[in-house]
Image: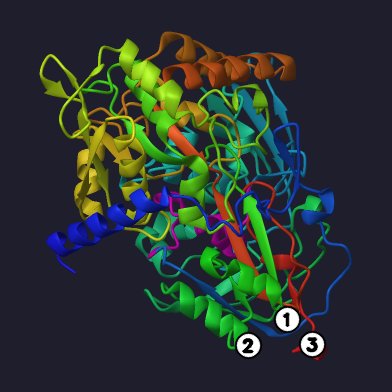
C-alpha cells in the first residue's frame, strides 16, 4: 500500500471516528478491564504466588509458542526490543532479581555490600555457575559483561544507559567483584535485574562477539538449538542447570525439554493456531480476540501491566510551535478521550491512564491520576486563556491570523495503529485544533525523532523495573546530543523536575525516594511533556495443558523455567 492510499484510508477512518466519537460499543461501555491483579486506591498489585511456583512440575515435553516479531539478534546488550523481557530469561541469567514487592534479591550474586557514599558495590558471587560453553561465571565474567554493555561497538540503546554511572570494576578475588560508580545511583541494582543486562559468556564476548547475535552462549535454563530470522527458533533444556532465582521457588533444571518459537506477525493466525491446538502458548495474545479466548474453556488469558512508564499517545516537542506553550499542551492532554483510545487499541483490555508512572511501580503516587483527565470544557478554557479565542470558518482556532495547527508523526504498527492517530485528530478538532497526520516509514520517524524535527510524535513506551524510567524519558540529561542518544525526545527542560529525579538517584532512604518521586510525578502533570493514554500491557494466552505459569518480577512476562505440560490434558 503506497503512502497516498494509506493517507486516504486514514481519512476514511477519521470520518467514521468523528461519527462514533471514539467510544466503545454501548454493550461494553463501563465494563471493567479484565487485567490481572487487584486495583485499590489507584494502585495495582499482584499476588505473591503469581511470581512463585506453587508446586514442582512434571518434566518433559515440547512447548509450541508464538510471538509477533523477531528481535533479529540474541545480543541482549545491543537492543531494546520488548521480547528480551521474556527471551532473556530463557537463555541468560542476571546478577540479581527483584522479589514480588520490588526489592532486590539474590540470583548469580549471593549478596552485596554498598559503600556509605553509595559509589562502590561489592558483589559476592555464586561459585557453582557455568555458561553453556563450559566457562565459569565469576568476577571476571561480570567485569567483561559490564564493559561489553557500554562498549561503543555494542551500540547499546538501553543497557549502556542503565549503567551510565558505572566507571570501572575490580576483580577482588575469583568470586568477588567491586563496581565503582562516579556518583550514587539508587536504581543500579534494579536495572541489573533486567533481561537486557543479562550475563553472556565472557569467552564469546572476547573471542567472537559477532556470533552472539545468532549463536548466543548464556548460563540460562535453555540453550539455543536453531534459529531462522523472522521465522522462529528452537531451544533445548540446559542439562545441569540449578541456579534459578530463589524468589521463583524453582529448583533444578527447567521442566520442558524443548521450546519451539514461531514468529507470527498476523494476530488472527496467532489466535486461530492456539484455538486449533496447533500451538500451546502465544506471547502476544491479540486484544481483539481476548473475549473469544476467555470464552473458550480450553484456553487461559492473562493480562499484566509493565512497570514504570505507561504508553504515550503522543510526545510534544516543547521547543516548537505550538507546544512551547504549556497551556496548549495541557489543553491537548485534556481533550484526548483516553477511554476511547484505549478501546481502539485494546478492545477493552487496556487500562486508561492519565499520569506518568505505571500504577504497579514502586513509589507510584495516585494523587495525580486525574490531573489531566478528559474534559473538553477545560481544554477550551485553556486555549481561550492562551489567546486562541478566535475561530476561522472551519472552526479552527486563530491568533494573530495564524491557525492553531501542528503535525503528528506516526508509523503504522500493531501497538499504535493509524486509527489511534485519527481518533486524536478527531478529538482535537472538537476544541478547534488542527492536527495533521504524517504517516512515514519507521526509519524516517526514527531519524526525525532523534533530530527533534517534529511537532508531536505518536506512540511509544519505555519499560524499566524502576521509577527511574522518568529520568530516562524526561530529565534534561536525557536529551540527545551529537554523541549521545537520549530518550527525552521532546527536549523538556524543567529545573524542578530535574532536581527531583536527580535527588531520587542519589537517595536510598525509602521516605526520601517517595518524596522525590512524588515531586517528579506532580511536576510532570504540570509540565505535560507527553500525553499518557493507557498502561503498557502484556497479553498472553495458553492452553489449559500448560501449567506452572508464573511471571518475571521485573517485566511481568512469563518465566518459562517453571512451565510444564500436563500430558494427560494434551
Q: Give the percent coordinates (x, y) of residue 371.
A: 55, 23
Q: Residues within 10 Å of mark 3 (few under 14, many from 20)?
A: few
User: Of label 2 and label 3, which has the lower sequence position?
Assistant: 2
| First of labels 1, 2 by sequence position | 2
Front-lying residue, 476 or 429: 429
Which tag is nearer the camera, tag 1 or tag 2? 1
Quadrant in which the N terminus appears: bottom left
Closer to viewer: mark 1 or mark 3: 1
Callout 1 touching callout 2 (CB < 8 Å):
yes
Residue that numbered label 1 is attached to: 298
Query: Which residues are drawn in magenta?
Result: 72-94
**Residue at image mark 2:** 277
Q: Disc number at residue 440? A: none
- Could you give the CA–CA distance between mark 1 and mark 2, rounded to whole angstroms? 9 Å
Disc 2 element: loop
- Residue that numbered label 3 is attached to: 569
* Kind of element beneath mark 1: loop
- Earlier in the chain: of badge 1 and badge 3, it is 1
Task: Indicate yes or no whether the magenta region holds residue 78.
Answer: yes
At 79% from the left and 67% from the top, the residue drawn is 252
Amino acid at each position: 500500500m503506497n503512502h497516498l492510499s494509506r493517507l486516504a484510508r486514514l481519512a476514511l477512518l477519521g470520518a467514521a471516528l468523528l461519527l462514533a466519537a471514539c467510544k466503545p460499543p454501548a454493550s461494553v461501555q463501563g465494563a471493567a478491564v479484565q487485567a490481572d491483579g487487584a486495583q485499590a486506591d489507584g494502585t495495582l498489585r499482584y499476588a505473591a504466588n503469581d511470581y512463585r511456583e506453587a508446586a514442582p512440575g512434571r518434566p518433559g515435553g515440547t512447548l509450541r509458542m508464538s510471538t509477533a516479531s523477531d528481535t533479529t539478534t540474541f545480543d541482549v546488550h545491543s537492543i531494546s526490543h520488548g521480547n528480551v523481557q521474556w527471551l532473556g530469561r530463557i537463555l541468560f541469567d542476571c546478577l540479581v532479581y527483584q522479589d514480588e514487592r520490588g526489592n532486590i534479591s539474590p540470583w548469580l550474586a549471593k549478596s552485596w555490600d554498598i559503600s556509605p557514599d553509595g559509589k562502590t558495590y561489592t558483589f559476592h558471587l555464586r561459585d557453582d555457575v557455568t555458561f553453556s560453553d563450559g566457562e565459569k561465571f565469576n568476577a571476571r565474567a561480570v567485569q567483561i559483561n559490564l564493559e561489553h554493555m557500554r562498549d561503543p561497538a555494542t551500540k547499546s540503546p538501553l543497557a549502556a544507559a542503565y549503567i551510565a554511572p558505572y566507571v570501572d570494576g575490580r576483580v577482588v578475588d575469583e568470586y568477588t567483584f567491586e563496581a565503582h560508580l562516579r556518583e550514587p545511583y539508587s536504581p543500579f541494582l534494579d536495572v541489573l535485574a533486567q533481561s537486557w543486562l543479562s550475563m553472556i559468556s565472557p569467552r564469546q564476548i572476547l573471542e567472537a562477539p559477532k556470533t552472539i547475535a545468532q549463536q548466543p552462549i548464556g548460563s540460562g535454563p535453555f540453550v539455543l538449538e536453531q534459529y531462522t530470522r523472522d521465522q522462529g527458533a528452537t531451544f533445548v533444556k540446559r542439562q545441569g542447570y540449578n541456579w534459578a532465582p530463589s524468589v521463583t521457588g524453582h529448583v533444578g533444571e527447567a521442566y520442558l525439554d524443548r521450546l519451539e518459537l514461531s514468529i507470527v506477525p498476523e494476530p488472527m493466525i496467532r489466535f486461530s493456531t492456539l484455538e486449533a491446538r496447533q500451538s500451546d502458548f502465544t506471547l502476544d495474545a491479540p486484544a481483539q480476540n481476548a473475549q473469544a479466548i476467555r470464552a473458550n474453556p480450553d484456553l487461559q488469558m492473562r493480562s499484566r501491566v509493565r512497570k514504570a512508564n505507561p504508553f504515550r499517545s503522543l510526545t510534544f516537542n516543547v521547543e516548537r510551535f505550538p507546544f512551547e506553550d504549556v497551556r496548549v499542551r495541557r489543553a491537548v492532554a485534556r481533550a484526548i478521550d483516553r477511554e476511547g483510545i484505549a478501546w481502539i487499541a485494546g478492545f477493552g483490555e487496556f487500562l486508561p491512564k492519565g499520569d506518568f508512572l505505571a500504577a504497579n511501580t514502586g513509589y507510584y503516587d495516585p494523587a495525580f491520576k486525574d490531573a489531566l483527565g478528559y474534559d473538553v470544557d477545560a481544554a477550551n478554557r485553556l486555549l481561550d486563556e492562551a489567546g486562541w479565542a478566535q475561530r476561522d470558518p472551519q472552526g479552527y482556532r486563530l491568533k494573530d491570523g495564524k491557525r492553531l495547527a501542528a503535525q503528528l508523526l506516526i508509523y503504522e504498527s500493531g501497538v499504535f495503529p493509524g486509527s489511534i492517530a485519527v481518533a486524536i485528530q478527531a478529538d482535537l478538532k472538537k476544541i478547534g485544533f488542527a492536527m495533521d497526520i504524517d504517516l512515514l516509514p519507521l526509519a524516517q520517524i526514527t531519524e526525525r525523532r532523534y533530530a527533534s524535527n517534529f511537532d508531536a510524535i505518536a506512540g511509544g513506551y519505555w519499560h524499566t523495573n524502576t521509577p527511574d524510567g522518568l529520568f530516562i524519558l524526561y530529565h534534561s540529561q536525557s536529551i540527545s546530543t551529537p554523541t549521545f542518544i537520549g530518550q527525552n525526545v521532546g527536549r523538556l527542560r524543567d529545573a524542578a523536575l530535574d532536581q527531583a529525579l536527580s535527588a531520587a538517584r542519589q537517595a536510598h532512604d525509602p521516605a526520601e525516594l517517595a518524596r522525590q518521586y512524588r515531586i517528579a510525578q506532580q511536576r510532570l502533570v504540570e509540565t505535560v511533556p507527553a500525553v499518557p493514554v493507557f498502561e503498557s500491557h502484556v497479553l498472553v494466552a495458553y492452553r489449559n495443558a500448560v501449567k506452572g505459569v508464573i511471571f518475571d518480577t521485573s517485566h511481568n512476562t512469563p518465566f518459562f523455567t517453571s512451565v510444564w505440560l500436563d500430558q494427560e490434558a494434551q
